[in-house]
Amino acid sequence: SAGWEGNVQYLGNGFWYSDDFCPKYTGTANLEPGQNYTNLLLAVGPGITNVAAVRCSLQYNPYGYEMIAFESDGGLNGSGDDFGRRFFYGGSIPFGAAVGYQLPYYSGGGTPSDGQLSVEMTLQYR
């Protein structure tokens, strides 16, 4: 996951741009192929209850939190598979998304137009 601030744009081919970007937290799990992991809880950023806690330089608006789904054990095209990302905006809890709202993640660049549905995640405070 990461904090971001300012303009966020998709540049194509899996590349994104923001005015400021800062890596924050990583949640990991060892998963077996072909298994269904419904309701798997993965702690990513313990203690985060406000989007201001994940800001970068405090210089740009809007600002928020980015959650990335990534398979790091290797993939067909290199060192891992990017399963997409979601950008949560500051100003409401949690980050413009409703607690418990399930969000689809797409492979490729993370958009439905250049990838396939790969995982669905729910952002929650615990």
Image: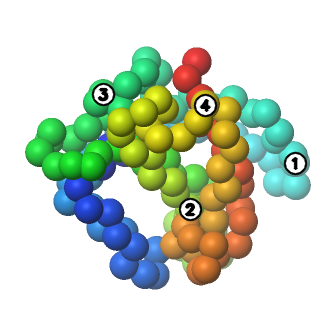
Position of residue 81 relative to residue 57, above or below, is below
The residue positioned 14% from the left and 41% from the top of the image is 57
Residue position marked by numbered label 3 in the rendering: 53
Residue position marked by numbered label 2 in the rendering: 84
Residue position marked by numbered label 1 in the rendering: 35
Q: CA distance from mark 3 to mark 4?
A: 17 Å
**Residue 99, numbered label:** 4
Position of residue 101 relative to residue 9, above or below, is above
Rendered-image quadrant of the C terminus: top right
Q: Earlier in the sequence, mark 3 or mark 4?
A: 3
Mark in the foreground, 3 or 4: 4
Q: Amino acid at mark 4?
A: Val
Image x and y of residue 11, in percent: 36, 78
Q: Is 39 situated left or right of 126 in this image?
A: right
Image x and y of residue 125, in percent: 55, 23
Most extreme residue toward the front is 92
Q: Earlier in the sequence, mark 1 or mark 3?
A: 1
Q: Amino acid at mark 3?
A: Ala
